[in-house]
Structures are given as structure tokens and as C-alpha cells.
């Protein structure tokens, strides 16, 4: 394992308090890194995020569009970072062979020294959902059952002492040979993305963290209460589930100028007008104090790990935003105030 430089040790000492953790997505889609950019510069983006004191580094997942494949990106940054959590926000497991995916994720956890967190989702209707299932020849109608069973299979493989088997409603495997054991005992923590009532219940019963993106902080508060209620009903300790938030962010001189940039980002990445994206996803822009205040509303509602997607369409602007967003850490600590930590099972090894 590579030793940290003195500069990185100092940066690590300036990390956020245990109450609030801040993460950022690597812009792995070509729509975000921009034409004429060498995508290998994304590795430098990841290293810079660690140097700035971010707690976590994330990649999203899709089979469509020019992009760097999510787990390949994490494999590229694992050896050039030291302590930052590496995560997926979110991975689409049902589009992958489940046993092979378990091996890949365990390998990533090993190569990162136990720094992996796996947030998963089942996709949603539209061009980011059913077409991906058609390409992967996986039934759309069974996606929620298949997702939960895939995660259960991973955990079985990661904890088995020898050959094992798995029998669910959809997945059936006999005599699976011993699999690669991850660095983290029991495997990387697994979070669920989604805020539908069924997703809230499943998060509380089965998952280690919750990663929704509600436009209204009030919905975050009520959703988190449902997650914790479901956890208690299942005999779990509600406070062990990490309350996270996925949010698109852009710091700008004015809210109006920020919205202009976010409109380009929304069209390029989602194929949606900004107003349509805002109807389904948390989106925040404006001067630094305004962005911090709006993030603070989610913190007050219970969020403790903020996973931020920078709303730009070129890598140079993304790097600038990376620096500017890091400067909000003191304001976010202040927003957390004396509230409880909400810490969950794994923020992922050394990045926790």
C-alpha cells in the first residue's frame, strides 16, 4: 500500500467531522467531460478530490452513451488514492451477471484497501430504464426482486467459507465455488437508491444506507422516518443505516447564471429541460452561502452523507467547481450543528 505524503496527511486531518460527509461524482460521461478532453484526466480529478478533503468519490452507471464504465473508473483511481471512499451512485446490478459482479466488487474492495461502498438501484422508466434491460436481456418487470436477490447472493458469496448455493425466486445457483473475499468483513456496505414506499421499506429491512434524491427536504425527512421504522420493525438498529443524499450542485455568482449552466447540463446528461429534472431530483445552484443553506435543509432533515454531482458540461469547469464546493465544508458543519451523527455501517474502510 502506497504511503500518504505529508501534504495528504495534513489534508486528511482537515476532513469533515463525523457528523457530515461530502462526496462528489467523477464526471465519467463524455457529456460532462466535454469534447477534446483526454478522459485519462478524470484520474487527476479524483486525486484532486482527495487532496481537497472530500470524504467520498462516486461514479454513476449506464450502458448507454459515450462514457467510461463505472467499475473500470473506480479500478483506475483505487491505486492513486489513499483514504477516500470509492462508491457507485448508483450501480445497476441486475444488468450484470451476478456472480461475476460479486467477484469484480470484491476485487475493487481489495485493491482499494476496503474503501468501497456500493449504492445500487433498479432503474426507472424512460430511456435510462427499460432500454437498458432490453439490451441486457433482463426482464424489466422483475427488476426489484432481481436486485434484492442479487445483493443477497453477493453477501452469501462474500461470507461463505467454501462452496455454497443460492436459491431465490429468480436466481438459482448450486455448488458455487469459493469466491474472492472482500477486504471489509461481510463485504462492502450496500446502499439503496430510491424513495418510493416499497424502496423505503426494503432499505430499512435489507440495506446499509439510503441514497435518494428528493427535490423537497420535507420528503427526505419523512422518507428517512419510514426507513428507520421499517428497520426497527425488522429487528435492526435504525441508526446503523447511513442517511445519504444524491444532489446535483452548481456554485455560481447568481442563481440565474447557475440555472443557465444547469439547463445545459440537464439537457446534455438527462435529455430533460431543467424544470423537468428539478421535478424529480434535488438540484441546487446559486452563490456559495445559498448553496450551503439549501444543502443545510437536507442536513436538518437528517442527511449525513452528501453525494454531489457537479452540474457542468466540461472538465475544466468541473475542476473549478470541485475546488469551490470543497470551500463549503465549514458552512455545512455549521448547518449540522449539534445534531446526531446518523452514522451507518460502513462508509467504507479508510474513507470513513
Image (spheres, rainbow, N blue to C red):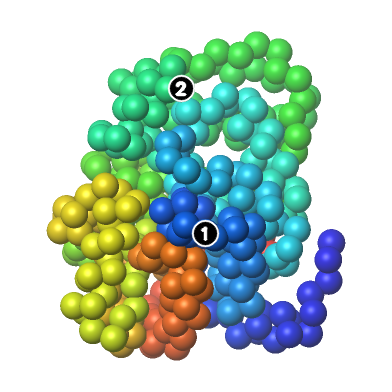
Relative vertical location of residue 72 with respect to residue 303 in this rendering, above or below: above
Is residue 229 visible in the rendered structure shown here? no
Label 2 secondary element: helix
Instruction: Report the Cα–Cα distance between label 2 and label 1.
Output: 31 Å
Task: Determine the residue positioned at 42% across, 36% down.
Answer: 64
Q: Position of residue 118 (x, y in %)?
A: 54, 47
- Name the quadrant containing residue 147: top left
The reply to whether discs 2 and 1 touch (Cβ–Cβ < 8 Å) is no
Q: Nearer the viewer, residue 186 or 262?
A: 262
Residue 46 is left or right of residue 288, and the answer is right
Residue 89 bears which disc, if any? Answer: none
Q: Position of residue 243 (x, y in %)?
A: 40, 60
Relative vertical location of residue 290 with respect to residue 131 in this rendering, above or below: below
- Which badge, 2 or 1, comes first in the chain's sequence? 1
Task: Determine the residue positioned at 70% across, 65% down.
Answer: 81
Residue carrying label 2: 136
Assign the N terminus to one quadrant of the image: bottom right
- Name the quadrant containing residue 308: bottom left
Label 1 secondary element: loop
Task: Determine the residue positioned at 26% across, 47% down.
Answer: 271
Q: Residues within 10 Å of mark 2 (few under 14, many from 20)?
A: some
Q: Position of residue 133 (x, y in %)?
A: 39, 24
Relative vertical location of residue 7 with respect to residue 219 in this rendering, above or below: below
Relative vertical location of residue 139 with respect to residue 280 in this rendering, above or below: above
Q: Nearer the viewer, residue 156 or 329?
A: 329
Residue carrying label 1: 36
Residue 104 is left or right of residue 221, and the answer is right
Residue 301 is left or right of residue 19, and the answer is left
Amino acid at each position: 500500500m502506497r504511503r500518504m505524503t505529508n501534504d495528504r496527511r495534513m489534508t486528511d486531518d482537515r476532513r469533515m467531522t463525523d457528523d457530515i460527509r461530502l462526496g462528489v461524482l467523477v464526471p465519467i460521461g463524455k457529456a460532462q467531460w466535454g469534447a477534446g478532453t483526454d478522459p485519462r484526466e478524470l484520474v487527476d480529478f479524483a486525486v484532486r478530490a482527495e487532496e481537497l478533503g472530500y470524504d467520498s468519490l462516486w461514479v454513476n452507471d449506464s450502458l448507454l452513451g459515450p462514457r467510461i464504465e463505472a467499475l473500470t473508473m473506480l479500478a483506475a483511481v483505487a491505486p492513486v488514492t489513499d483514504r477516500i471512499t470509492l462508491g457507485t451512485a448508483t450501480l445497476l446490478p441486475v444488468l450484470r451477471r451476478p456472480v461475476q459482479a460479486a467477484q469484480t466488487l470484491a476485487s475493487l474492495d481489495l485493491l482499494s484497501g476496503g474503501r468501497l461502498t456500493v449504492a445500487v438501484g433498479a432503474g426507472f422508466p424512460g430511456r435510462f430504464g427499460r432500454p437498458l434491460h432490453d439490451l441486457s436481456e433482463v426482464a424489466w418487470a422483475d427488476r426489484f426482486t432481481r436486485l434484492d436477490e442479487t445483493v443477497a447472493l453477493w453477501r452469501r458469496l462474500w461470507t461463505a467459507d467454501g462452496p455454497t448455493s443460492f436459491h431465490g425466486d429468480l436466481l438459482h445457483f448450486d455448488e458455487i465455488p469459493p469466491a474472492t473475499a472482500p477486504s471489509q468483513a461481510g463485504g462492502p456496505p450496500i446502499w439503496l437508491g430510491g424513495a418510493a414506499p416499497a424502496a423505503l421499506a426494503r432499505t430499512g429491512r435489507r440495506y446499509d444506507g439510503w441514497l435518494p434524491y428528493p427535490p423537497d427536504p420535507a420528503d427526505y425527512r419523512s422518507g428517512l422516518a419510514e426507513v428507520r421504522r421499517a428497520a426497527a420493525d425488522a429487528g435492526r438498529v435504525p441508526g446503523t443505516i447511513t442517511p445519504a443524499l444524491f444532489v446535483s450542485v452548481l456554485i455560481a455568482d447568481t442563481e440565474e447564471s447557475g440555472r443557465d449552466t444547469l439547463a445545459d447540463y440537464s439537457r446534455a446528461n438527462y435529455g430533460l429541460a431543467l424544470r423537468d429534472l428539478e421535478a424529480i431530483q434535488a438540484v441546487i445552484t446559486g452563490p456559495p452561502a445559498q448553496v450551503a443553506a439549501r444543502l443545510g435543509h437536507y442536513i436538518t432533515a437528517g442527511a449525513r452523507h452528501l453525494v454531489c454531482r457537479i452540474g457542468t458540461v466540461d472538465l475544466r469547469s468541473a475542476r473549478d467547481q470541485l475546488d469551490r464546493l470543497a470551500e463549503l465544508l465549514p458552512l455545512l458543519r455549521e448547518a449540522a450543528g449539534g445534531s446526531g451523527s446518523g452514522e451507518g455501517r460502513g462508509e467504507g474502510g479508510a474513507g470513513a
